Image (cartoon, helix red, strand yellow):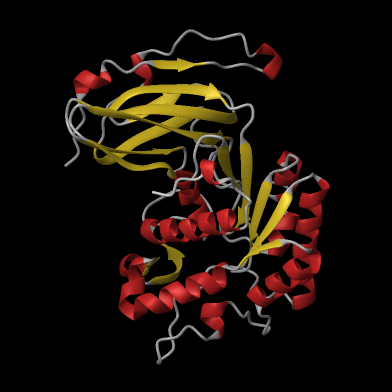
Amino acid sequence: MRRFNIALLAAVTLSTALSAAPAQAHDRTPPLSIANCTATACHFDVPPGTYDVTVRLGGESAASTAVSGETRRSLLPETVTAAGQTVTRSFTVDVRTPEGEPTGPDGTPGLDLALGGSAPALAGIRVTPAHHARQIILIGDSTVCDQPGDPYSGWGQQLPQFLRKGVSVANYADSGESTVTYLANPLLWGTVQPLINPGDLVLVQLAHNDKTTDEATYRANLETLVAGIREMGGRPVLVTPIVRRWFNADGTLNNDTALLVNGLGVDLPGVVRSVAAAEGVTLIDLTAQTKALVESLGVDGSKAIYLYNEKKDNTHTSVHGATVYAGLVRDALVARHLLPEGRVRVG
């Protein structure tokens, strides 16, 4: 059962420095009142943008606190504090409309944070505009997106918890999208491309729904995305798709369903690898990594990674599975020196 130290809640201090433009950064609104937080949530009436959040966790009693926000994004992993201890943690969050999937509902205006964990205790919080944050933009499908409801979760939804203040995740993955539909929909590529700033990392994982896309078209679509990212000064990263949990009798995943060879016989991860090599683009081979992990866990152990137990679903991940896969992406970004280690949570 969760508990929350109400005495500590009464001591929470909330402040925010909001401005319409960097030139007006000296104009500050009055500190927000305690009404902006309840025992389990906070709401900040801020416009779309990128914000730094600093929280002070803990208090008189032992506590264990996690922070999520917007559409079920994990922003801070569960943090344990001993009785009488407080710790300060910071992260950067993307606030946008729609707040979840780009083709979904707008969601709630402003920044919403949820306090979770087995015994949440918030001793202080501060929200300020993040003027110099690096941005990771995600382009993908339902295995990546900010899923709106339990028990589903995309790995992009879990990635923010692995990042410290100074790096935000803008997740523009959308359920059901292929390379064909993502490029064609003005709410997707037409919206995302203008948002890419010079130096932004843009991770692309689109394959699960390219079930009838021929090889030439799939290759051309990936090349279009790479060129469009570079046109804006962004840094493209091609990500091969996570495997489906579809075992052979011998306990391997060496079959078309698991390894995303589509109905036309197109080896979609293979094409991603080929385009990355030809275009000189950083590759994260998530297919190979997730295949190795799922096979190591075996038929029974891998069920918890996906939604087999809940939905008999061997494609979409649980919160646990999405968190594990997000950790693989984090590790790959660090290994390729795309993120400084100081901006990454390793615990």
Left or right for 78, reference 162 = left
Q: Position of residue 136 (x, y in %)?
A: 62, 45
Work out whether 82 lies above or below 23: below
Closer to us: 156 or 82 = 82
Q: Position of residue 13 (x, y in %)?
A: 36, 16
Left or right for 198, reference 263 = right
Q: Residue at x 73, y 39 (%)?
A: 197
Q: Position of residue 266 (x, y in %)?
A: 68, 81
Q: Is residue 322 visible?
A: yes
Q: Is residue 109 visible?
A: no
Q: Residue at x 54, y 16 (%)?
A: 17
Left or right for 21, reference 256 = right
**Number of labelled discs?**
0
Q: Residue at x 63, y 68 (%)?
A: 207
**Can you name the residue that lies furthest to the bottom here?**
250
Work out whether 169 lies above or below 222: above
Query: Which quarter of the figure has residue 248?
Result: bottom left
Closer to us: 298 or 142 = 298
The N terminus - image quarter: top left
Q: Position of residue 251 (x, y in %)?
A: 40, 87
Work out whether 98 lies above or below 59: below
Query: Which quarter of the figure has residue 196?
Result: top right
Q: Residue at x 42, y 25 (%)?
A: 43
